[in-house]
Image (cartoon, grey):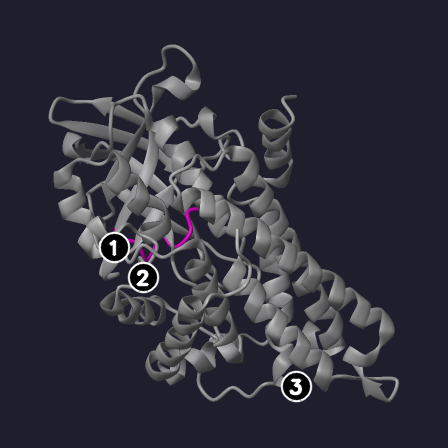
């Protein structure tokens, strides 16, 4: 594994910087810089710009329309995107269901769905968690009854991110109750416009709408939307979760928040000097930056294995997920600390870019608390830290 950028990688980094500088819409860049909340159109507009360049699915194999980015290219893109204030990419399509489709899907399924993922014309959501089936995902109860040429789906999903924006869902459903509970699970693609699908919002403390409860009432799903074999959904889900947990390294987010932290700490005064010069605060910043560099090396190893076709293994992806979320949480803690009392004000007008609402206090204090509160969930969603540590103990230590 080579950590120094090669001349080719340096050229790629320059290409990414030039492309973002020329193509990232100014209004979106400004929203990200000012911690404004982004809507569906903001995300889709930027992703479609990337899609035209072939960069929304840059890591995909060329035979499926990707660029076959190396591990280092993937890291370079995410790092530069964070530095240049790009929006978070909605990875449910390109990094989750996309690899499942081109690995396990039929040619017909691939032809139907992969082009729309590549150009970001379709928004996907993930239907996994249920009431009573979160960390213990295999306990899910949403039933898919075989009705000949279709399944009849009944049940509920919860904490479904951006389901209110989604055109399609990839979900786990129970098609059998015989044998081990993992053996009766299947992987279905569900059109969110199908009669019987109901999306109910779950609003955050600061008024944001990311999460949803999704109900299925006699929803007809064609059998052609079954991925792979019936009853093998758990296998496909484990494959997908390895990709999801690598995405949960939060490389772009951490890069952006670190950049913001340095800026705020340089601006805020403490005892007559910039906070960044305070020995205790500077030490805390250095510690989290060192942890981030270590995480990047671990992520590079994991991505190198994936690109080489090797099995990543649950232990490695769990390590990446744990460290990425813990580092992100620590940075948001330091941002709240640096912003001080000014960050305690709740200002929905500026946050949601409503009307001509002015920010009370310094602009940098608008978003840290909202971001901090949201990031407390990072060590729960995508597989809780406690469960990830058990996976690492089982797979890495043989316990």
User: Vertical placement of 62 versus 172: above or below?
Assistant: below
Q: Position of residue 259 (x, y in %)?
A: 61, 74
Label 3 packing within 10 angstroms: few (<14), some (14-19), many (20+): few
Give the CA separation, mark 2 to mark 3.
Answer: 35 Å
Label 1 packing within 10 angstroms: few (<14), some (14-19), many (20+): many
Residue 130 can be seen in this image: yes
| Residue that carries the numbered disc 2 in the rendered image | 56
| Residue that carries the numbered disc 1 in the rendered image | 117
Q: Position of residue 245 (x, y in %)?
A: 50, 45
* Secondary element at image label 1: helix
Q: Which residues are magenta?
A: 158-167
Q: Position of residue 253 (x, y in %)?
A: 53, 64
Determine if the magenta segment contains residue 248. Answer: no
Q: Disc number at residue 362? A: 3
Residue 354 can be seen in this image: no
Q: Earlier in the sequence, mark 1 or mark 3?
A: 1
Q: Nearer the viewer, residue 149 or 110?
A: 110
The image quarter containing residue 271 is bottom right
Instruction: Classify residue 285 as left or right of residue 107.
Output: right
Residue displayed at 30% across by 68% down:
50
Instruction: Classify residue 195 as left or right of residue 213.
Output: left
* Secondary element at image label 2: loop
Do the CB atoms of the residues marked 2 and 1 lie less than 8 Å apart?
yes
Q: Position of residue 173 (x, y in %)?
A: 33, 29
């Amino acid at each position: 594994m080579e950590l120094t950028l090669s001349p080719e990688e340096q050229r790629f980094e320059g290409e990414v910087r030039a492309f973002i500088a020329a193509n990232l819409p100014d209004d979106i860049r400004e929203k990200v810089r000012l911690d404004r909340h982004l809507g569906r159109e903001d995300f889709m507009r930027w992703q479609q710009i990337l899609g035209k360049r072939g960069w929304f699915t840059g890591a995909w194999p060329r035979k499926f329309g990707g660029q076959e980015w190396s591990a280092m290219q993937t890291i370079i893109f995410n790092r530069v995107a964070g530095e240049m204030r790009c929006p978070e990419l909605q990875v449910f399509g390109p990094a989750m269901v996309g690899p499942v489709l081109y690995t396990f899907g039929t040619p017909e399924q691939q032809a139907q769905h992969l082009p729309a993922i590549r150009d970001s014309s379709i928004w996907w959501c993930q239907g996994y968690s249920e009431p009573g089936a979160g960390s213990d995902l295999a306990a899910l109860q949403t039933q898919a009854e075989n009705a000949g040429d279709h399944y009849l789906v009944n049940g509920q999903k919860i904490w479904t991110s951006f389901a209110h924006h989604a055109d399609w869902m990839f979900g786990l459903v129970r098609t059998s109750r015989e044998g081990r509970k993992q053996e009766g699970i299947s992987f279905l693609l569900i059109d969110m416009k199908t009669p019987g699908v109901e999306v109910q919002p779950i609003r955050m403390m600061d008024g944001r709408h990311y999460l949803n409860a999704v109900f299925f009432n006699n929803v007809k799903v064609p059998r052609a939307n079954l991925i792979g074999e019936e009853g093998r959904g758990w296998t496909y889900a484990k494959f997908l979760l390895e990709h999801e947990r690598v995405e949960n390294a939060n490389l772009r987010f951490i890069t952006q928040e670190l950049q913001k932290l340095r800026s705020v700490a340089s601006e805020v005064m403490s005892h007559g000097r910039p906070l960044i010069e305070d020995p205790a605060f500077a030490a805390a910043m250095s510690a989290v930056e060192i942890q981030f560099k270590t995480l990047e090396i671990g992520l590079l190893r994991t991505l190198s294995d994936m690109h080489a076709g090797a099995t990543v293994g649950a232990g490695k992806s769990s390590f990446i997920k744990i460290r990425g979320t813990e580092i992100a949480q620590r940075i948001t803690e330091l941002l709240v600390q640096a912003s001080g009392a000014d960050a305690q004000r709740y200002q929905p007008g500026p946050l949601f870019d409503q009307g001509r609402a002015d920010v009370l206090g310094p602009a940098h204090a608008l978003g840290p608390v909202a971001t901090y509160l949201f990031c407390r969930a990072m060590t729960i969603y995508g597989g809780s830290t406690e469960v990830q540590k058990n996976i690492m103990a089982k797979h890495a230590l043989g316990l």
